[in-house]
Image (spheres, rainbow, N blue to C red):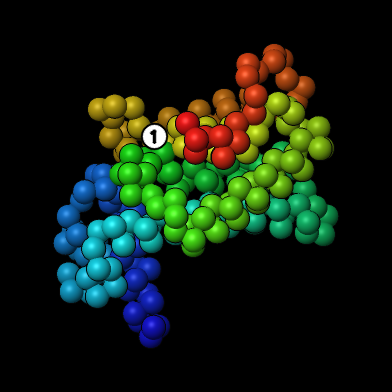
Amino acid sequence: MRADAVRNRERIVDAARELFVESGGEVPLDEVARRAGVGNATVYRHFADRDALVRDVVLAVTERVANRAQRALDALDAPGGGEPFEALRAFVSGAMDERVGALCPALSPRFGSGDAELVRQRERLEALVGELLGRTQRAGAVRADVGVGDLLVVISQLTRPLPGAGCARFERFIARHVQLFLDGLRAPAPSRLPGTPATLEGLRQT
């Protein structure tokens, strides 16, 4: 695609993500076009239907969260390194900004488990977050009885508004609750967690 077409597509996906967070997955596509600053015809030129747009939003958000995990790992590997727990904190705080929990109700019914590209992005996300979490655990900074699934579930749940609460009103609580969660991850743990660490594969089977 030409550079201007690529930019238009990115604007459409970004606008759709914002509106799905604010209003749900059934927001009119002409509203997406207005938010993106393009015409309706441009939206349909890039996306044949709503499901095609939803797919690209899922891909974009998954990639962005994975890239945040990669940046956290890169910071640990940079000269002088850094504290593993601070790298994990940076990842969690950044991942919260993607508002995955607010997107889940809108997008999950359309999430194609058989889509090879979606599967690749999900596996990349799981691998990067697993490496980041493993490094903090091996450093003794995070309790050993949590798994990648636990981390991603909490990121999703903490960004999901309560029933009847709008996303805008809910955002002011997120930083406070993220800090509560991060404090609960620290080692040594003051208690034993019931059950076993959550895995993404196990969550998909529930």
Label 1: few (<14), some or many (≥20) within 10 Å? many
Q: Position of residue 28 (x, y in %)?
A: 17, 55
Q: Secondary structure at mark 1?
A: loop
State the image quarter where residue 198 is shown.
top right
Amino acid marked by disc 1: Arg
Answer left or right for 83 relative to 162.
right
Q: Which residue is mark 1?
A: 160
Q: Residue at x 64, y 28 (%)?
A: 197
* Residue at x 63%, y 16% (from the top left corner): 194
- In the rendered image, residue 161, in percent from the top left (x then y), is placed at 35, 32
User: Relative to 8, does residue 204 appear above or below in the rendering?
Assistant: above
Q: Is residue 180 above or below residue 73?
A: above
Q: Position of residue 46 (x, y in %)?
A: 29, 73
Instruction: Tell whether 98 sits left or right of 18.
Output: right
Give the residue displayed 56% in from the left and 34% down from the top.
202
Q: Is residue 164 visible?
A: yes
